[in-house]
Image: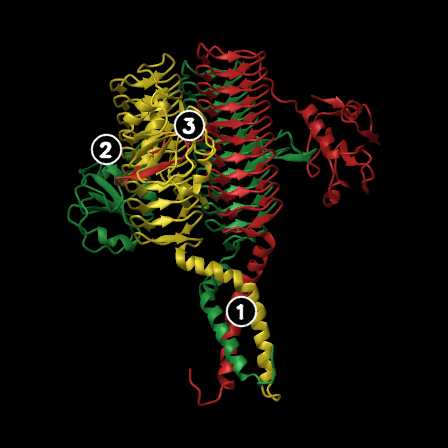
Chain colours: A red, B yellow, C green
Amino acid sequence: MPMTLEELAQACNARIEGGDPTALLTSAADISSAQHGQVTQLTNSRYNKYIKGSAASACFVAEGFALPDVPPTMALLVCADPEMGFIHAITLLHPERHYPPAIAPQAVLADTVSLGIGVSIGPYAVLGEHSQIGDHSAVLAGAYIGAHVTIGKHCRIHPYAVIYDDVVIGDHVIIHAGAVIGADGFGYKFRNHQHIKVPQVGNVVLGDHVEIGANTCIDRGALGSTTLGIGSKIDNLVQIGHNNKIGRHVIMCGQVGVSGSCQIDDYAILAGSAGIADHVHIGQGAVVMARAGVAGDIAAQTQVFGSPAKDKRVAYKEQVALSKLPELLKKVKYLEEQLEQLQPQTESR
Amino acid sequence: MPMTLEELAQACNARIEGGDPTALLTSAADISSAQHGQVTQLTNSRYNKYIKGSAASACFVAEGFALPDVPPTMALLVCADPEMGFIHAITLLHPERHYPPAIAPQAVLADTVSLGIGVSIGPYAVLGEHSQIGDHSAVLAGAYIGAHVTIGKHCRIHPYAVIYDDVVIGDHVIIHAGAVIGADGFGYKFRNHQHIKVPQVGNVVLGDHVEIGANTCIDRGALGSTTLGIGSKIDNLVQIGHNNKIGRHVIMCGQVGVSGSCQIDDYAILAGSAGIADHVHIGQGAVVMARAGVAGDIAAQTQVFGSPAKDKRVAYKEQVALSKLPELLKKVKYLEEQLEQLQPQTESR
Amino acid sequence: MPMTLEELAQACNARIEGGDPTALLTSAADISSAQHGQVTQLTNSRYNKYIKGSAASACFVAEGFALPDVPPTMALLVCADPEMGFIHAITLLHPERHYPPAIAPQAVLADTVSLGIGVSIGPYAVLGEHSQIGDHSAVLAGAYIGAHVTIGKHCRIHPYAVIYDDVVIGDHVIIHAGAVIGADGFGYKFRNHQHIKVPQVGNVVLGDHVEIGANTCIDRGALGSTTLGIGSKIDNLVQIGHNNKIGRHVIMCGQVGVSGSCQIDDYAILAGSAGIADHVHIGQGAVVMARAGVAGDIAAQTQVFGSPAKDKRVAYKEQVALSKLPELLKKVKYLEEQLEQLQPQTESR
């Protein structure tokens, strides 16, 4: 939705410096590619080099941010938090797709489904017995909602996400396409030379403001729940096994794997492809770096690296030492020879 | 389905010690959270601490298992195999969802589809030409079954699982949501500076009692079949490439990757995120530990760790040694200095 | 489609040596399993051992390839490029499934959808507003095409692939089942102790002849596009984050992860489960070996291994050195003792 510079500045609580207040802004872009009619941001001096030649019509910057070579065609939008200002601008210029509050005739809803007001159900969505969808939530095309599922308000369930029976989802939750919430956990007992399935009769509980990436899987508890707290954000292709208790505002990047029965405290960050063995406790605010493999508990606020994962500083030190190891082998061989020569001639090893 | 203690004990072949035989049990829970009306199990003395304060109404234990401080409100269900007894109890108290033997009017079945008795086909399921579904199998909402697919008896295909053409599936197989069975293997020939697709015209054959996790992918053979033997269990987000021959009762945990043309023998276990290069042979009962990267053959009954994977004991020894390496570097430097001083003064390196 | 030896030889530009030109060939198989009526290939002398006992009716070989013990029942199909000849033979004997150029009555197409000639739309496919499908493309059962999506000619979109709004797809592109193209990138700003979503308003652009594996995810740009160049081939369960710029003829094997804002140049190869941190540049033709974790730029034509990834030769040398480390620790201890004995007795450390 195009807006004038003046309208955008007002909506984003920014002060205009330079430029034409009536100029029309049509979209947002990053500083390296923004063109005439576009708004951008600059919050890191590393990117100052892009300013001089930029054709952007407006640029969010922080109060007091020193900017050389601002082209005369570029207005500055000065505010206390330019990143948040820019996010707001993006939201205004690129409004989210609106899904009409209606039930597609091609959806299949069990008789006992309960829908809030303003709910949108897309074609080929399937909603099972006793499922409930809160106000203003959108269940998009082909999303599958099992029986006895509860979904809160203002949620968006993307196409072909699958929510198995009994899952409970809070408000403002986004579930991307292909995510599978509540499939069976991976549990077997070995008897008579075969693996006997342990019934997985628990569920999954997702707090408010959780976002789940595409094709991510979160297994139901074997007994009891697998839980994610308020505001936790999970990227694509993440595997979260049964009975994990994941706190609030936790971040898991792409392809992370969490085995089962772990406790991951608030604000922990699991970087890309990190893996956590079962029954592990990750403390509050701990950071598991990319590709780390964690087999034991991690203290709050610590950072771990490597597989098996260790304190980041220890792991880095070992990596540096490892790079010196081939040379060290030679040195020790030389020392052995030297020492040999120093030995009394009669001695023999 | 609630049952009395007496009924449950009888169904599970357990002997009651204490408690009220007419007490009603409504569900199962683990020992740390079980409440009044719930049954639990205790098979590991590590969890004995939970017994004293537990409100559980019944607890499966092994014959002769010493349990101190059993609350008077808790009946013991004593049997030879309490884990299996408890599994049976869960099955009785939490019966599986029943899918009625009917074809949803919103399903699309090719004219040449053949269905056994008691088959359930959910809404928006699609079954291609000449596909066959065995007795009492359930193809749930939106599952896609290609042409010339054979599915055995008592199978359950969950929503949006995709079974490509020509796949053969045994009896009692479970395929979870979003799993893709029989997509093209990843094969190209490099000619004239581009990758030319090698047609993938084989199929996938899954034995009886196989279970495939959510969003797992098993590629069809380029020529011939990719096969999984009886009773093999595959977790979520696993990638199994073309022409792998996987034996019986093999376990693959979440996010495992198997390249192609591997042979994995019976009872092998691939732990979470393990990866296997192509044309590798994993011997019977071998264990590939979590995150291990296997590039060469693994002998039967061995355990490997690390990437590149080595015998577990060797790999552990190297890990221990690595942790001493930074200190070793200092030691060798000291030795060099000491040795320098011992050298005759006239010598110079 | 069965063909005579003579027909096949002519279609594949091969010269027949031996065998009966009128013999019927019905299918293709690999050399280790090919039976009567099947054609195979032999291009690597490592597999010569299979020739003697083979029942294959025909075998592609290179001009001048020395083959001992050819059974009298086997015709040789001699040509300059037997691999390409064999591929062509497979294509002829195992023709691709044909999808009729028709729109299934169970598909939902927005009024503003534009379809080329010969387009096939399967049941339960959903095509959003202003989406365009080029000539002879097939959108199979249940594929979801968002709004303002452009798909070129001769594409095949498999069941339950999800193409989010605004994605642009070239000609001759194959997208396998469950792949998700254009879901939101993973971007948040941390404010007031919570993660605030950064709107993801860019898109994904796929060049001609791209192939995307099952359940792979390619995120839309935050601003601007995530791009894949002509001829790039992506295997299953790969995660490609937002704003990556991926060149032409790039290969990514199963479970690769690419964070975001990376530049990956033409002909690069990322082997299975390799991971790339954000803002990394991978040079042309570089090879990232299986399970490598790349945190810094990789020069063109180099090969890297390990995590953190290093030049292959360096990494291998370190791995060899690591295997000698436990022994080295013992050696150094022995040296210390020897040196101690050589020290003047009055000295004490």
Element carrying mark 3? loop
Label 3 vs label 1: CA separation?
69 Å
Query: Within 10 Å of the Cα at label 1, are there few (<14), some (14-19), or many (20+) other Cα atoms?
Result: few
- Would you name the residue on which mark 3 appears? B73
Q: Which residue corresponds to the image point at 59% horizontal and 36% vertical from the top-left?
A: A250
Q: Is residue A345 above or below residue C138?
A: below
Question: Residue B65 placed where, x, y %?
Answer: 34, 40
Check if mark 3's residue and mark 2's residue have beta carbons within 8 Å.
no
Label 1 vs label 2: CA separation?
63 Å
Q: Between residue C174 and residue B31, name the one nearer to us.
A: B31
Mark 3, mark 2: which one is toward the viewer? 3
Q: Between residue C201 and residue B341, name the one nearer to us.
A: B341
Query: Which image quarter holds the N terminus of chain C?
Result: top left
Q: Which mark is residue C2?
A: 2
Q: Is residue A263 above or below residue B340?
A: above
Label 3 vs label 2: CA separation?
75 Å
Query: Which image quarter holds the C terminus of chain C?
Result: bottom right
Check if mark 1's residue and mark 2's residue have beta carbons within 8 Å.
no
Q: Which residue corresponds to the image point at 21% horizontal and 51% vertical from the top-left?
A: C51
Q: Chain of mark 2?
A: C
Question: Residue C132 placed where, x, y %?
Answer: 52, 22
Q: Residue furthest left?
A: C72
Q: Chain of mark 3?
A: B
Seen in the image, is A173 located left or right of residue B63? right
Q: Amino acid at mark 2?
A: Pro
Q: Amino acid at mark 3?
A: Thr
Q: Amino acid at mark 1?
A: Glu
Element carrying mark 2? loop
Query: Within 10 Å of the Cα at label 2, are there few (<14), some (14-19), or many (20+) other Cα atoms?
Result: some
Can residue C293 be seen from the camera position used here?
Answer: yes
Q: Chain of mark 1?
A: A
